[in-house]
Amino acid sequence: MSSTDRRRILLERARTHGYLGVRGLARELNVDGSTIRRDLAHLERAGLVRRTRGGVLPADPADAVDLPYSVRRVENAPAKKALGQAAADLVSDGQSVIVDSGSTMYHLASALRARQGLTVITNDLMVGVRSAGHPTNRLHVTGGFLVDTVYTLVGPDTGAALTALHADWAFIGAEAIHPAAGVTNINVIEVPVKQAMIAAADRAVLVADSSKFGRRALAPVCPLAEFDTILTDDALPAEHRDAYGPALRTVQV
């Protein structure tokens, strides 16, 4: 197979399936990994794909692709850790906290271990594992069925569990944030869960790194006015910040 044919196939697969792993592509096309990486580098220089850890994405995947957890966790990790700490700083000992799914929320769960007497409620299995085993904090993991690649519980049971609860805080992640469109999501099935989290809490905080801002995705979640605080990192350009209103706070990374 010529390099032109391979690159055409790679681009078609990326646009159709979203994230693709280099190892799987090499096996499928019967070439070694270095050949695939050269092909991906060529497509990246042309602006057609974006390479990430161990794989490839379409050039602008945030509007169409739900990334595997293994990819999310390493992307923008310093910003996510700083945001997790800043979010945890809002919480006092003894409060109840709803923690949404996602890699930024994993860092929040880590930071919340410094608090005492919390009730942590989540639909994210990785957040649950990170929150478990604390000597004074209690953990409530919602029911639901599993979205395998992102370790998230969703569905009617998840929403029902959240509707029956009340919390001091809800910390919500986002895949796309836009001044006019508000928070939008790639995966439609997660939308009712996020809405139920916001409704169950006295105060809602949007926590997302700056790469999510200025984007729109498929499914509307809520307007930005639903949030008491919007936390992002200081890489969000200063000239864009006013558009997100007075609730926006930037965290130094």
Image: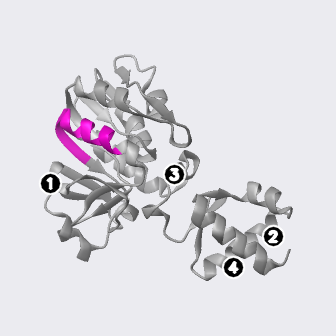
Q: As rendered, which of 223 and 33 lies closer to the eye? A: 223
Task: Say above or below: 49 vs 45.
Answer: above
Task: Please name the amino acid that badge 2 sits on.
Answer: Thr
> Disc 2 to disc 3, how far (Cα)?
25 Å
Label 3 crowd (10 A; few <14 / some 14-19 / many >=20):
some
> Relative to residue 50, is residue 1 drawn left or right?
right
Residue tagged 4: 42
Residue 212: x and y, percent? Answer: 37, 61
Residue 156: x and y, percent? Answer: 35, 30
| For the residues bearing labels 4 and 1, Cβ distance under 8 angstroms | no
> Disc 1 to disc 3, how far (Cα)?
27 Å
Task: Say above or below: 171 vs 49.
Answer: above
Q: Which numbered tag is attached to residue 225?
A: 1
Sequence-wise first label, 2 or 1? 2
Which residues fall within the magenta stretch? 191-205
Magenta residues, dominant SS class:
helix
| For the residues bearing labels 2 and 3, Cβ distance under 8 angstroms | no
> Relative to residue 229, is residue 39 drawn left or right?
right
Q: As rendered, which of 56 and 131 lies closer to the eye? A: 56
Question: Which quarter of the rendering shows the C terminus?
Answer: bottom left
Task: Please name the amino acid that badge 3 sits on.
Answer: Arg
Q: Label 4's element?
A: helix
The residue shown at (80%, 58%) is: 28
Task: Please name the amino acid that badge 4 sits on.
Answer: His
Label 1 crowd (10 A; few <14 / some 14-19 / many >=20):
few
Task: Say above or below: 140 vs 82.
Answer: above
Residue tagged 2: 35
Place residue 112 in its image quadrant.
Answer: top left
Sequence-wise first label, 4 or 1? 4
Residue 158: x and y, percent? Answer: 36, 29
